[in-house]
Image (cartoon, helix red, strand yellow):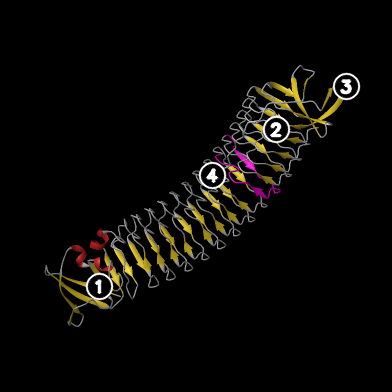
Amino acid sequence: MLLCIIGAKAYAYDIEVKNADGITIYYNYINDGNELEVAQSYNYCGNIVIPEEVTYMNRTRKVTNIGYQAFYGCGDLTSVTIPNSVTYIESYAFYGCSGLVSITIPNSVTSIRNSVFSDCSSLTSVTIPNSVTTIEGCAFFNCSSLTSVTIPNSVTSIGGSAFGDCTSLTSVTIPNSVTTIGGSAFYNCSALTSVTISNSVTSIDVCTFCDCRSLTSVTIPNSVTSIGRYAFSGCSGLTFATIPDSVTSIGDYAFEKCSGLTSIIIPNSVTEIGYKAFYGCSGLTSVTIPNTLTYIGCCVFEACSGLTSIIIPNSVTSIVGFAFYGCSGLISVTIPTSVTDIGDSAFENCKSLTSVTIPNSVTTIGNYAFAGCEVSEVISKIESPFDIKAETFDDNTFNNATLYVPAGTTDNYKATEGWKNFIHTVEGSPSGIKDPEREGENEIKRYALNGRVVKNPHKGISIIQMNNGKTQKVLVK
């Protein structure tokens, strides 16, 4: 967020002239002394009417400017009438005018400068004339009573933090003329329930709508190609968001802590999803990942506790560390045969995850990758097992889960670091037939269907004789 702060300036003026109503206004000469600007004074209060012309020492001059910090900190100022002769209002002109409830900006003004109305906490509404083309940074920052604003079609850019901390602003329409919206432009507009973004905007910048907690839905137009860092971070009321096919990148923390978001479709145009882009979206139950992604970045879906299932496309080659950390509702995940790397803690604390299938394409599995998961079966398709850390799975998984391995690889797995910690290793795939060892029973002998004693599991149906006299059929695929 931009810092809307100012430095001090000495209080000075060239002349002082009383209006017809007896109120004194202070002026400076500008443009070689041919025109006047309203000068800074801490004495302005009540209702101020700025005249179009001022006669002083038998000479009449037009008032064309309102100077830098002219009304700065005038907390007792309640209203200002600005004449059409004024074409320029300098930065911070009305900064901190906490009693100002209304103001009319004339059609002669073309730009609303930096922090002009910052901290005007009593200002309830403002009409921006069609002459204005730019609203600069912090222009209305912390106007906490501002409930509505009309942005005309003449405006082409909205500066950073322009409406930041306008906590009473309920709706805003950004016209088609606007091509640029600065970072934090609507930061912490906590009452904002709806926003219309014009199809001329090409990017949603850093923290543009972050902490807009009442925002329930947003439609991003097809003109937008990137969603910046923290763009919608903390929009906890957001339940619906449409990301168009034009978007190629979603920045770090873009939808962080959007706890009301229930589903999101990421289009095929997206090639990059930033760090913690959907972190803490606890209401998210489903997500569609496009097949244009080659990796799922660090912590992208961390703490999405409502996510129950996810399909990772075949384009993904790497699942980076903490990608799904703390997705406690995740029941199943399909890792495609394109994936070669599963990072540290990638699925750690996915407490509901009961089954994991690891394709033969995987060459590295990071530490704590499946720690904290109550896994009952691990199906490894890896033909040549490689070392994994003892903390890759929990002791509970090593002791109680069944590890299913390719035919003829049991000895290799039992000789490989990490994998050898599994107590129950079976060749083949889960059959749905109970493994008697899971019931605490011990196998005495194993027979093929022709009655021949076999020493190791083999494909097909085997008959197992248990130590309690029972027999069980086991199918190994």
User: Mark 1 to mark 3: distance in Å?
Assistant: 104 Å
Q: Viewed as shown, does residue 209 lie left or right of 19?
A: left
How many other residues sit within 10 Å of disc 1, few (<14), some (14-19) or many (≥20)? Answer: some
Q: Quadrant of residue 8?
A: top right
Whole-percent x, y for residue 67 in the image: 72, 32
Mark 4 in CB contact with mark 2 (< 8 angstroms): no
Q: Earlier in the sequence, mark 1 or mark 4?
A: 4
Question: Which span of residues is magenta-colored?
Answer: 168-188
* Residue position for label 2: 68
Residue identified by numbered label 3: 58
As measured in the structure, the alpha-carbon distance from the residue carrying label 4 to the one carrying label 2 is 30 Å
Position of 155 with respect to 221 (left or right) is: right
Query: Disc 4 marks which residue?
Result: 210
Residue 183, magenta (yes or no): yes
- Mark 4 or mark 2: which is in front? 2
Q: Are marks 2 and 1 in contact (CB under 8 Å)?
A: no
Q: Position of residue 126 (x, y in %)?
A: 68, 33
Query: Where is residue 134, by image quadrant?
Result: top right
Q: CA distance from mark 3 to mark 2?
A: 27 Å
First along the sequence among labels 2 and 1: 2
The reply to whether discs 3 and 2 touch (Cβ–Cβ < 8 Å) is no
